[in-house]
Image (spheres, grey):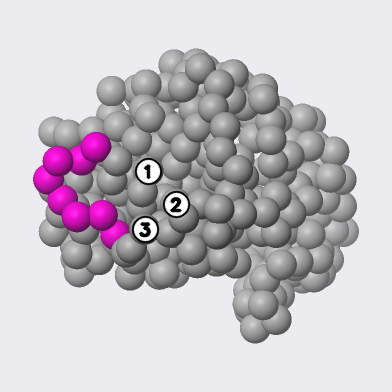
Amino acid sequence: MQKSVLTVDRFEIPYMLFGEGPHLLICVNGMQQTMASWRSLVRHFAGTSYRVALFDFPNQGRARCLHGSACVGILEQVGVLGAVADTLSPDAPVALIGGSWGAVVAAAYAARRPPRVRRLVLGSFQVRPNARLREVARLGRSLVAAGRGDELGEVFVGTFGAHLPPPRQRSIVAQFAALRAEQFQQMFEHAERLVNEEDVDSVADLRAIHAETLIVNGGADPIVDAVDTETLRRIPGAELRVVANVGHFLHVEQPAILETYAEFLHRDLPDGAAAGSAVNDDRQGVRSASLA
């Protein structure tokens, strides 16, 4: 394991690198998640042809703003992701995996710098927020504005995290109770985008993505429409896997989904072993689709 800190413009970004494989997989955190959220994925990919890179965005974990506004826009987050990719794999394209808001950032980067991304996994992803997500965003925004941000944990668990085990739910509630003012403001600004129904194409033309792309959505996710044909139309050749009885947190709720990621990321690679053992999609309740 390698640990270091990267200075990107006005930010200090901690990162960790695991493994020695020839290919690089970068994990992109969701909103208010940290590197720790990818522990099970790192274990699953140990000894494969992928090195796995984790990092924190500003206002997550140990990352920090060195100067300027404490709030960080999506294009600045895309820039941080690009700096991590350029630092750890300057001469070869990378693979990306992002969940929820992290999937939005990963997709935007892949669209803005197509040659730099070879494969792309987007978890709990759609191009435009659905009605339920907009409703939750409006509630979250009002709580932050009223100085009641500590109540967000219960809201988050009741919607995003309803399928998580109780210990993980309690951890999320405690995490939200400890958020700093700038982190609440960051969430407020993200919620503003969602309330306004902002489309991912407002920051990047997804039709420009060259990477082989897999979208994985939970069939029981209340805030993402599991089958969204508009999303498939936007990303050339994208594949969709819908996993039955799984909510927003995908592999955290059903660890077998890690094998779905691994099968896609290792497909047609001539120089390394795939992670884990094969898991039949039917046993996971996975439905697949694609739209060229």
Res 275 seen here: yes
Residue 92's quadrant in the figure? top left
Q: Report the number of numbered marks.
A: 3
Residue in view at x 24 percent, y 37 percent: 268
Upstream in the sequence, badge 1 or badge 3?
Answer: 1
Q: Residue at x 37, y 43 (%)?
A: 264
- Residue type at mark 2 is Thr
Q: Disc 2 vs disc 1: Cβ atoms closer than 8 Å?
A: yes
Residue 132 to residue 126: above or below: below
Q: Is residue 269 magenta?
A: yes
Residue density around tag 1, few if under 14, some if 14–19, many if 20 or more, within 10 Å: some
Disc 3 or 2, which lies upstream in sequence?
Answer: 2
Tell me, for residue 278, which label it has, or none.
3
Tell which tag, 1 or 3, sits nearer the viewer: 3
SS of the residue under disc 2: helix
Residue at label 1? Answer: 264
Residues shaded magenta? 268-275
The residue identified by callout 2 is 260
Left or right position of 4 against 244: left
Main SS category, magenta section: loop
